[in-house]
Image (cartoon, helix red, strand yellow):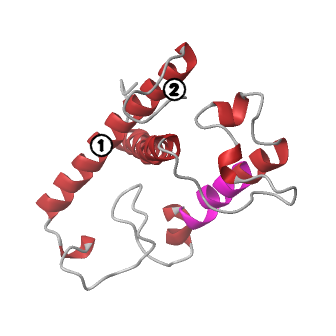
């Protein structure tokens, strides 16, 4: 993939890997939490359906009791708005809000006085933390893939309950 690639191509691929890792971390955690029986309280629509009335995992999108098409498109639109506007460092840079340190820097120019704030780390600490996030993302991508495959082949999740 990187044969005859320049630095810009490498940084783009690293950014995509980082973004997919962040999404996978959210997906894995969401899958584990909902399978443990934790759902948002209240109803999801005007008809009175509750959040826990829909199945967990892939069945929420593709099963017989799946989320209705209108709900799916709302989720899709929300992700699009986040992707194109709020969580877009290129847009923030172009608007002069802040200059990101690297592709995937989503601080949006926020600076904190906390001793654990990103601006207070040394370059070596920043490199280590970025490597940790990248590796956690890789592990989460494998984890969510494993959960999805386990769901498709059938069976149960012995630690977190039945499907």
Judge from the rendering whether residue 56 lies leftward or rightward of residue 24; answer left or right.
right
- Residue at left 41%, top 45%? 25
Work out whether residue 23 or residue 156 is closer to the camera in this orientation and state it.
Answer: 156
Judge from the rendering whether residue 154 lies leftward or rightward of residue 22; answer left or right.
right
Looking at the image, residue 45 lies above or below residue 159 = below
Residue positioned most to the bottom? 113
Looking at the image, residue 41 lies above or below residue 7 = below
Judge from the rendering whether residue 104 lies leftward or rightward of residue 88; answer left or right.
left
Residue 6 point in image, percent of width and height: 37, 38
**Within the magenta stretch, is there residue 80?**
yes
Give the Cα distance between marks 2 and 1: 18 Å
The N terminus, quarter of image: top left
State the predominant SS element of the stretch in magenta. helix
Residue 92 point in image, percent of width and height: 52, 71
Upstream in sequence: badge 2 or badge 1: 1
- Which residue in the structure is indicated by mark 1? 136
Q: Secondary structure at mark 1?
A: helix
Residue 137 point in image, percent of width and height: 35, 42
- Which residue in the structure is indicated by mark 2? 148
Is disc 2 in contact with disc 1, using a CB cutoff of under 8 Å?
A: no
Q: Secondary structure at mark 2?
A: helix
Which span is picked out in magenta?
76-87
Few, some or many residues within 10 Å of mark 1 (<14, 14–19, 20+): some
- Residue at left 75%, top 45%? 72
- Residue at left 36%, top 28%? 2
Residue 69 point in image, percent of width and height: 83, 42
Work out whether residue 107 or residue 22 is closer to the camera in this orientation and state it.
Answer: 22
């Amino acid at each position: 993939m990187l044969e005859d690639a320049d630095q810009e191509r490498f940084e783009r691929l690293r950014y995509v890997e980082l973004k997919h890792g962040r999404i996978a971390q959210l997906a894995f955690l969401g899958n584990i939490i909902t399978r443990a029986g934790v759902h948002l309280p209240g109803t999801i629509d005007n008809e009175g359906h509750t959040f826990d009335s829909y199945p967990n995992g892939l069945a929420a999108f593709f099963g017989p009791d799946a989320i209705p098409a209108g709900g799916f498109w709302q989720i899709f639109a929300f992700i699009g708005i986040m992707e194109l506007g709020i969580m877009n460092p290129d847009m923030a840079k172009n608007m002069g809000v802040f200059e990101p340190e690297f592709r995937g820097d989503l601080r949006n120019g926020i600076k904190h006085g906390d001793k654990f704030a990103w601006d207070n780390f040394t370059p070596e600490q920043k490199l280590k933390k970025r490597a940790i996030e990248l590796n956690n993302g890789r592990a989460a991508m494998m984890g969510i893939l494993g959960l999805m495959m386990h769901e498709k082949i059938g069976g149960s999740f012995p630690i977190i309950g039945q499907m």
